[in-house]
Image: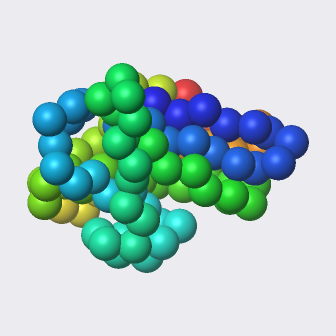
Amino acid sequence: MINSDPKTGQVTFVCTVAPKAKKVFLVGDFNDWDATARKMVKVKDGSFRAKMDLAPGRYEYKFVVDGEWIGDPDSDHQVCNPFGSCNSVVIVGGDACGCACGGCGCD
């Protein structure tokens, strides 16, 4: 799940798939898919959250839950990756995918 402020570019990523997880990290093309760069914080409802300031654009991401790479089931957009699974997609700043919804999977 994602909450974003289109005016500031601040995006809150929310991982709800693993309330019993010990560690959850946010990975994506915005941090070179570094599985330890962005640790998410567990909140009272059991979800994990991370805020990021992102420039307008299209970003692919996943969650790393106790070492397992998981797509965001609450994401509206998914694209296949070369590893046989799908990445979740967030678009910051409205129509930032630049494809007129004809090939990136955002339609």
Q: What residue do we see at 39% from left, 53% from top?
A: 40
Left or right: 79 as drawn, with respect to 4: left
Q: To which quarter of the image does residue 16 belong? A: top left
Q: Is residue 28 above or below residue 15?
A: below
Q: To which quarter of the image does residue 18 belong? A: top left
Q: To which quarter of the image does residue 53 belong? A: bottom right
Does residue 88 appear anywhere in the picture?
no
Left or right: 92 as drawn, with respect to 27: right
Does residue 93 appear anywhere in the picture?
yes
Whole-percent x, y for residue 39 in the image: 37, 61
**Residue that extends furthest to the right in the rendered view of this protein:** 7
Whole-percent x, y for residue 106 in the image: 54, 35
- Quadrant, the N terminus: top left
Q: Is residue 24 above or below residue 30?
A: above
Q: What residue do we see at 16% from left, 43% from top?
A: 21
Q: Is residue 69 above or below residue 74?
A: below
